Amino acid sequence: MLSLLLLFFVMNLVYKSLFYEKDLQKYSSIINLVRDVPLDADIIYLGESSNNTVRADDLDKRKISDFMGDYFPGLGIYDLTKPAAHAGIFKVLLEQMPEESEVETVIVTLTLRSFNAQWIHSPLETSLQKGLVLLRPYPPLVNRFLLSFKAYEIKSGEEREADFKKQWQRDKLSFPYAFPHEHVREWDRWMAYQGIPDSSGEIDRALTELACHYIKAYGFQIDTLHNPRIADFDGIVELARARGWKLVFNLMAENTEKAGKLVGKDLIYLMNENRELLLKYYGAKGVMVVDNLSRVEDEQYIDQNWTTEHYAEKGRKTVAKNLAGAIRSLYPEEFRDAGY
Amino acid sequence: MLFNTIDFAIFLPIVVLIYYLIPQKQRWMLLLAASYYFYMSWKVEYILLIFASTLVDYFSGIRMAGLPDRRSRLPWLILSLCVNLGLLFFFKYFSFATENLNLVFQKVGLAREIPMMQLLLPVGISFYTFQTLSYSIDVYFGRQKAERHLGYFALYVSFFPQLVAGPIERYSRLAPQFREKHKLSYDNVANGLRLILYGLFIKMVIADNISGIVDLVYAHPEHYGPGNILKGIVLYSFQIYSDFFGYSSIAIGSALLLGIRIMDNFKTPYLAKNISEFWQRWHISLSTWFRDYLYFPLGGNRVSKQRWVLNILVVFIISGLWHGASWTFLLWGLLFGLLYISERLLNDALNLHRAYPAFSAGHLLLAVKTFLLVTILWVFFRSQSVDDAIHIFKLLFQKAPTDPQALLIPLSTWIFLLLFIISDMLLYNSRFDSWLTGRPFLLRWSIYAVLLFGIIAFAGVENFPFIYFQF
């Protein structure tokens, strides 16, 4: 047994000194996002593509986190932006923050859509999870072993699609009034069959398809006991508590205007219900939750035929302003009105 | 559940531990439950196909055993053949058959079209179908007594180490071992672990690191010059060998941990001096299956030369189609058959049956020749269509002074490949576990350390399932 331990120790040493860094750069280059944050940063902003997606005609193509920085010119604000990331990824990134980092406040993007079945079972998930294996809190050789032996959920795109379709059918919708559809699958089918008429009374296929997307993207009710995203955000809360960070969840704007126009009040009801739940749930845990849900007008959404949180310049500035206004209470001396 | 995943690394020790803790009489139940669980981890529903095969062959066997002659047993054999081959045909060949029939209808101007079905091929169906068929045929010919215990029979059909990709075992070899009392023995555990370690190394370090490179070349051969295409073609020879040999070693090693011996599937095939010897060393369990259940019943070589040629072609074409429902596999089998026949006729005509000592210049020259021929034929095996294969050959002989795109092959891949070739030569007519037995302690442990470190630190991280799982 002793010789096996010795063998492990030597192998780990060899791997750590000669190969680990190369593997990190090859398979987990996400670590560089954390390494790029200076130790004396005051605030870090964790975001996905909503932070840095711009429209071609934007005059100012900076990120939400940069716009927010304009309100606090005296603070060191840095971002960790990873497209398609979610709380599970953010949590691992935060775990990598060096102990000697002087970060005081952590702002985490809270995207309502990331709680839906399609995002939870996204085909990108296998590759995202693979990228995190080497960052697990074990010795480097153990992490490489776990990576070699595929210790993460490997599912093909088809399998994940089957998973979210199953969930659409499994999760029952509940309204305080009579609602004709039992679950999102049924609602989606009804919408596809019913269709949205255009001005001439003909079914507008593109609009109908978009309405279906909205139903599938926002037609859910967060179950705090079983939704894996809740567990991820809870983990971030625990981590922030342990590290002494002030934690802010930035609930991103969704196109409620279009959702209402295309699908109607039922979908808005669900979106608002989920918003309230998140505000209450994380408010009770001492997290500052900034509510941007309906702050951005339809015109400012870059993707007009899909559901995303990609905002044009004015939209990004609106979110930044709202966020800055909320954290002003944390840094009253540092706040300057950026004039957006 | 793949052999090279953390799931199997947890599953196997648990099964082995419980196996040795429970009484021998209950072990079949554990192994059967474990085998079904193992199989259902792919797709739960497909266990029903294994149930169907098991029940039909079990009852056919019992019925045949009670009948006095072959004639009266024949209907039961036909039932077994129809059910097993019917399932295999439906899941594996139906789409191919309908696609080609529709093409024929179109050519002759018939306005009829058979509807196509997109069916997911149940993993391992070709393997367990052939395994269970061999039992029915043996019972029919009276070579095998019928199994009366449904549990043991079900275990023979589904024994997890060899369920999804062989080796295809015979009832007379495998099933009696389930009834034997196996004590936990140092030799079995040590040899089993050695084989698993070696198998994991050649699958994860050799095959999986080559896989991505080969995929690039075969996906877009026009991006590469002849030199790199040649590299892709040669590397595929090593990929398929290390992938399947790796799988087989893990399967044999896993069974050995339970005290059960499974037949060898590979014996350094790339050191074969001719095509005939290659097939005695490559996928041995399938070659011997075809020999015993197709080639011999067709008359083998105790027939006229023309008939023998026909027998060989039939066996190789069916063997090709066994691998997959595609013209590429059919052509691959046909070409192997033609090569086999030409080599044999040429050797007979020129009296070239000389035995060369191992690793003599003559042996090595012939081995290189065989390797090159086999490598050329792998192009048909690996290509998506016959047109793709021809396209690759055309590009191989094109004039291109420089490669349009570089093919980056890490130095570590070459080093490990070289190590694999050396180890294959060392293991000529031997097996990794027996080769290691009796070697000095320091040498053995140095080899374990290198293999273990290689598996952990250099394994390919992309999820490349074993190639033969698709058959």
Image (cartoon, coloured by chain):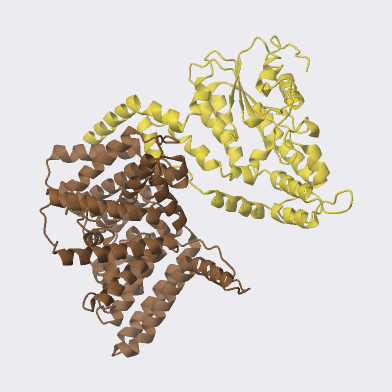
- Residue A8 position in % (x across, y down): 28, 33
- Residue B7 position in % (x across, y down): 40, 48
Q: In this view, does B82 lie to the left or right of B68?
A: right
Residue B142 visible here: yes
Q: Front-most of A3 and A158?
A: A158
Q: Is residue B1 left or right of residue B287?
A: right
| Residue lying furthest right | A200
- Which residue does the image show at 26% across and 46% down from the upper left? B198
Q: Front-most of A39 and A212?
A: A212
- Which residue does the image show at 15% across and 52% down from the upper left? B363
Q: In the displayed structure, would residue B158 be above or below residue A280? A: below
Q: In the displayed structure, would residue B358 be above or below residue B222? A: below
Q: In the displayed structure, would residue B185 be above or below residue B116? A: above
Q: In this view, does B197 lie to the left or right of B163?
A: left
- Residue B408 position in % (x across, y down): 39, 35
Q: Front-most of B430 and A332?
A: B430
- Residue B52 position in % (x across, y down): 44, 73
Colour of chain B in the image: brown
Q: Front-most of B423 and B183?
A: B423
Judging from the image, what is the letter of the chain drawn in yellow? Answer: A
| Residue lying furthest front | B399
